[in-house]
Amino acid sequence: DSGVTQTPKHLITATGQRVTLRCSPRSGDLSVYWYQQSLDQGLQFLIQYYNGEERAKGNILERFSAQQFPDLHSELNLSSLELGDSALYFCASSVGTSPAEQYFGPGTRLTVT
Amino acid sequence: QKEVEQDPGPLSVPEGAIVSLNCTYSNSAFQYFMWYRQYSRKGPELLMYTYSSGNKEDGRFTAQVDKSSKYISLFIRDSQPSDSATYLCAMSASPGTASKLTFGTGTRLQVTL
C-alpha cells in the first residue's frame, strides 16, 4: 500500500457525461500528479500540482481539468466524455518537486459507454 | 520516435533465473531514472531510482544507467513467480518547474515454476 488513495475504484458512464476523480496524497506529500494509462498510449502524464498550484501540464485535453485543495487532496474533472477516454487514471504523490520518488495510488478505472 | 523505448515482451524465464530488463531513451536531458513494477490492474509500485549514471543495488534488484549510451537496465537475481508483472522504466529531467515522468511501454515478465 503506497499510502495514496483514489476514489472511486471503478466508474462506468455514458458519452457526453462529466465525472470527477478524487485523490488523497500520502501524508506529508505536497505534490500530486495525474497520469492516464491506456492500452495504446501507455502511461501518460497529465498534470502536476504542488501545494495547491499548477506546476506542469502534459498532453491534457481541454475537456479535462484538475485542482488541488488546501488540504492537498486533488480532483481530476473529465467532461464531454468520449469512448476514447476509457482508461485507468492514476494519481501519484511526492514530498517535493523531485521526480525521483513518486508513489502511485491504485487507480480509477473509467469506462465510457 | 518515442522518447523512451522498451521491449514489451512477454519475457518468460524459469524460477531462479537472472532477468535483464532494458530501456533506451533519446532525451539527453533525462537525469532521473526509475523502475516501477505493476501487477495486473494495480498501480505502479516504485522499485528503484537512480540519479545520473551508475549502479544501484537493493536486495535482488540492480539498476544500471549508462548515460553515454542512453541505456538503462534492471537486473533481477533469483527470480521468483511473485516477480511476474509488468516492469516500467520511467525517466525525468531535472526538477524545477516540472517533475513529470516519461514512461516506457512496459515489459511483461513471467517467471515459471
Image (cartoon, helix red, strand yellow):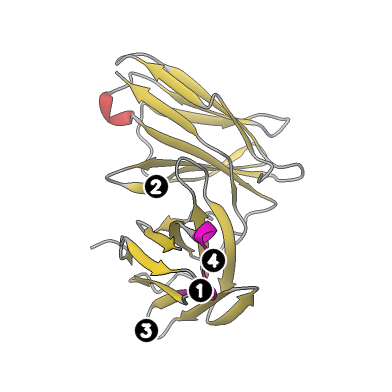
The numbered dot on residue B94 is: 4
N-term mark: 4 or 1: 1
Q: Amino acid at mark 1?
A: Gly
Q: Is residue A83 visible?
A: yes
Give the residue at x 53% y 68%: B32
Q: CA gap, disc 3 to disc 2?
A: 25 Å
The residue where tag 1 is placed is B16
The residue where tag 2 is placed is A44
Q: Nearer the viewer, residue A90 or B75?
A: B75
Q: Looking at the figure, which quarter contains the N terminus of chain B?
A: bottom left
Q: Amino acid at mark 3?
A: Ser
Local packing at callout 3 (Cα closer than 10 Å; few below 14, some 14-19, many 20+) is few
Tag 3–tag 4 contact (CB < 8 Å)? no
Give the residue at x 33% y 18%: A80
Label 2 chain ID: A
On the rendered structure, is B69 left or right of B45?
A: left
Q: Nearer the viewer, residue B94 or B88?
A: B88
Tag 1–tag 2 contact (CB < 8 Å)? no
Relative vertical location of residue A47 with respect to residue A95 in this rendering, above or below: above
Q: Are marks 3 and 2 on the same chain?
A: no
Q: Is residue B96 visible?
A: no
Tell me where the magenta segment starts and ends, as one range: B73-83
The numbered dot on residue A45 is: none
Q: CA gap, disc 1 to disc 2?
A: 33 Å
The residue where tag 3 is placed is B69
Give the residue at x 29% y 16%: A15
| Mark nearer the viewer, 4 or 2 | 2
N-term mark: 3 or 4: 3
Question: Is residue B81 a member of the stretch shown in magenta?
Answer: yes
Question: Is residue A107 a member of the stretch shown in magenta?
Answer: no
